């Protein structure tokens, strides 16, 4: 770890645009390799059939790829969030047939468009709801929907439907300045989708969910709502594809969606979207779509039977998944090898300096938080029998206890993750009751969990601001993420805590354990935070990193925030505790100072083998 000069971290330093997404060598090279694959295909098909290299041919490839261009943005967003919808081909067939029937029956283009997009959104919503509700793999849920929608398409009509109103045909075949409407619509959808993914708050949250859904949830991201919304948006896009296809082709057979999902998924994954979630960029996705378009057209051009397209696209998908796995392997191998240029500076106003002098306790200070008579049982197991203690303003209270003593249960109650069967809490003298961690956070009580609740695929700045991203109006109209303000805000917070950065655009995945812990603690510290609950902040850290975190915790307390620290690390207890609260078999058995106690005394107190007066 290297420390950086204060100038390097000055809040007014201009920042580049901060984009979430991949930065590992494996992912970058797979996109570069893909461009080469696309070029190689063009050369190969041109050699096999010189007529392939023709402007008209590429225009046709572009027009034929419009359905994939529209659908790939929804599929990519789902994949980035760590989800998938395999049913889009069958959904396209079902919506296409229904749209066709409505268009023929009413001869109204408006009704056809409304039916397509509305039905798509409804089917997508259903898929999203089932995926979240059933809590099983989205692969299985949407595979079932694939069969269901595909079958229903044949129930509605087992033969092709045609006889559409002229306005629908005009929509599919008309041109503006010589360019087909369908191409313009596809480009508009792709650009709008890319804008949402890279420039908006929702986009960042989609990457965050794919990086670590639980961490995103703990940071206040509404994961369930976002995922269901993504499925609905994806369905609406499939509805749009169905309408445009009806207009372009002039008839819709129930086989219209065959292999569609395979083409779309392959384009997205070839384009660098990680099947494992959390990564993928529009530029790569565009190259992926182009590759699939060239491949499909080229195979027809050289006169191969259609099943060779299946073979080729299937092989491409396998290769892309393999590249994805290699990228993950490379990333894991390189873990920890990079330094982020981050250090915790030594503040000058510390109550206890590095020489270990005891700092004065603040046991008698104004109470910021109090819990009384907390009781929690899981069936016959009493996890917490009597949890009562207080925390003063700026006081550090260490919560100690042997395994199974009830510490986690008490912390979960305080943080709103579970509700006690009995007991009460006050925050700054007011009675509080939290029905969720979000409630607790809103009241000014933050919890930093042992597994940190950070998204490894996002930058330090984005992690610091996740769930409360500042926004601005682009062109005075469209709300976009204000990454510059986010960076300034996050730097200011880190500097206040003595954490200086050389590069806050680095991904959290490349930080060391101590650096991550510092970021996790710093991100929990908003302006209105009155109490922070830290769960084993120094577990699994080395000596130097532990000292860094100890410094950080101390400076937070000095600023007046109350701290509850759950730890098994007696050196940390001795360095930080104003007071200790010891739990044994679900009961508080000691609440007082640590002065004069040896580490053995502390262990004995937890184990119940010695009494301390
Ligand atoms: N969800 C649950 N269902 C049933 N029993 C539980 C549940 N959660 C905790 N317990 C039980 O409650 C008791 C206290 O558990 P708790 O996790 O609070 O202890 P702890 O002090 O945090 O232990 P550790 O240090 O090992 O994490 C244990 O006996 C545990 O098995």
Image: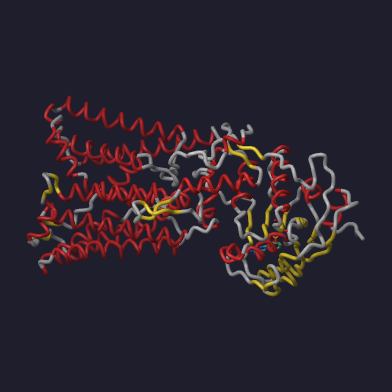
What percent of the width, then of the height, locates residue 537? Answer: 68, 49
Residue 369, horizontal then vertical, whole percent: 71, 65
Q: Nearer the viewer, residue 597 or 43?
A: 597
Residue in front for this viewpoint, 376 or 463: 463
Q: In which quarter of the view is residue 17 placed?
A: top left
Give the quadrant of ligand 1. Answer: bottom right
Residue nearest the observer in this picture, 511 or 346: 346
Spot the residue most to the right: 613
* Above or below: residue 283 compared with residue 173: above
The reply, left or right, for residue 56 in relation to residue 31 is: left
Instruction: Left or right? Give the position of 269 relative to 538.
Output: left
Residue drawn at (85%, 48%) of the image: 599
Position of residue 334 relative to residue 469, above or below, is above
Q: How many numbered marks have been drawn onto this rendered protein structure? A: 0
For this orientation, the residue located farthest to the top is: 47
Q: Position of residue 64 (x, y in %)?
A: 18, 44
Q: Is residue 352 above or below residue 220?
A: above
Asked where in the image residue 391 lies, by quadrant, the reply is bottom right
Q: Determine whether, in the image, residue 509 is placed left or right of residue 315.
A: right
In the image, is 272 to the left or to the right of 418?
left
Q: Image point 31% across, 37% down: which residue?
A: 315
Q: Nearer the viewer, residue 104 or 499?
A: 499
Image spot of residue 10 (x, y percent): 57, 39
**Residue at (83, 56) in percent of width and height:** 607
Quarter of the image for the N terminus: give it. Answer: top right
Q: Quadrant of residue 362?
A: bottom right
Quarter placement of the C terminus: bottom right
**Residue drawn at x 10%, y 51% as measured from the top left:** 174
- Colour treatment of the image: secondary structure
């Amino acid at each position: 770890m290297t420390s950086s000069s204060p100038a390097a971290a000055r809040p007014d330093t201009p920042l580049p645009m901060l984009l979430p997404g991949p930065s590992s060598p494996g992912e970058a090279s797979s996109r570069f390799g893909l461009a080469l694959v696309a070029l190689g295909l063009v050369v190969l098909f041109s050699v096999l059939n010189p007529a392939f290299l023709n402007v008209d041919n590429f225009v046709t490839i572009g027009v034929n790829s419009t359905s994939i261009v529209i659908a790939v943005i929804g599929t990519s967003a789902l994949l980035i969030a760590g989800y998938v919808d395999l049913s889009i081909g069958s959904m396209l067939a079902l919506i296409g047939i229904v749209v066709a029937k409505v268009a023929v029956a009413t001869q109204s283009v408006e009704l056809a468009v409304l039916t397509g997009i509305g039905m798509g959104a409804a089917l997508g919503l259903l898929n999203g709801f089932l995926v979240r509700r059933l809590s099983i793999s989205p692969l299985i849920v949407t595979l079932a929907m694939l069969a269901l929608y595909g079958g229903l398409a044949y129930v509605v009509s087992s033969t092709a439907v045609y006889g559409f109103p002229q306005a629908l045909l005009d929509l599919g075949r008309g041109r503006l300045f010589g360019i087909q409407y369908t191409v313009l619509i596809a480009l508009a959808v792709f650009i709008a989708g890319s804008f949402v993914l890279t420039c908006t708050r929702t986009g960042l949250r989609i990457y965050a969910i794919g990086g670590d859904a639980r961490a995103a949830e703990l940071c206040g991201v509404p994961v369930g709502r976002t995922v269901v919304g993504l499925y609905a948006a994806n369905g609406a896009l499939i509805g749009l594809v169905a309408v445009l296809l009806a207009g372009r082709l002039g008839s819709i057979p129930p086989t219209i969606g065959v292999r569609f999902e395979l083409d779309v998924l392959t384009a997205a994954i070839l384009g660098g979207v990680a099947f494992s979630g959390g990564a993928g960029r529009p530029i790569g996705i565009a190259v992926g779509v182009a590759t699939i378009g060239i491949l499909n057209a080229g195979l027809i051009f050289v006169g191969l039977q259609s099943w060779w397209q299946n073979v080729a696209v299937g092989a491409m998908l396998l290769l892309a998944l393999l590249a994805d796995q290699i990228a993950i392997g490379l990333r894991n191998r390189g873990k920890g090898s990079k330094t982020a240029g981050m250090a915790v500076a030594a503040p000058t106003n510390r109550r206890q300096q590095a020489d270990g002098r005891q700092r004065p306790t603040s046991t008698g200070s104004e109470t910021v938080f109090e819990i009384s008579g907390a009781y929690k049982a899981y069936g016959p197991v009493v996890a917490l029998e009597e949890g009562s203690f207080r925390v003063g303003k700026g006081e550090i209270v260490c919560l100690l206890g042997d395994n199974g003593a009830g510490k986690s249960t008490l912390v979960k109650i305080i943080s709103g993750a579970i509700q006690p069967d009995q007991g009460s809490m006050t925050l700054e003298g007011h009675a509080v009751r939290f029905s969720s961690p979000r409630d607790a956070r809103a009241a000014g009580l933050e919890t930093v969990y042992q597994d940190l609740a950070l998204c490894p695929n996002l930058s330090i700045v984005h992690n610091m601001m996740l769930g409360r991203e500042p926004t601005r109006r682009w062109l005075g109209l469209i709300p976009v993420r204000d990454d510059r303000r986010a960076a300034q805000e996050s730097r200011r917070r880190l500097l206040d805590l003595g954490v200086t950065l050389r590069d806050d655009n680095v991904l959290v995945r490349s930080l060391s354990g101590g650096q991550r812990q510092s970021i996790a603690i710093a991100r929990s510290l908003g302006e209105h935070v009155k109490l922070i609950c830290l769960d084993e902040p120094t577990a699994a850290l080395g000596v130097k990193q532990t000292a860094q975190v100890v410094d950080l915790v101390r400076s937070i307390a000095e600023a007046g925030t109350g701290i509850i620290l759950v730890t098994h690390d007696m050196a940390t207890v001795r360095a930080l505790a104003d007071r200790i609260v010891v739990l044994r078999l679900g009961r508080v058995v000691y609440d007082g100072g640590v002065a004069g106690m040896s580490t053995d005394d502390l262990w004995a107190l937890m184990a119940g083998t010695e009494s301390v007066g």
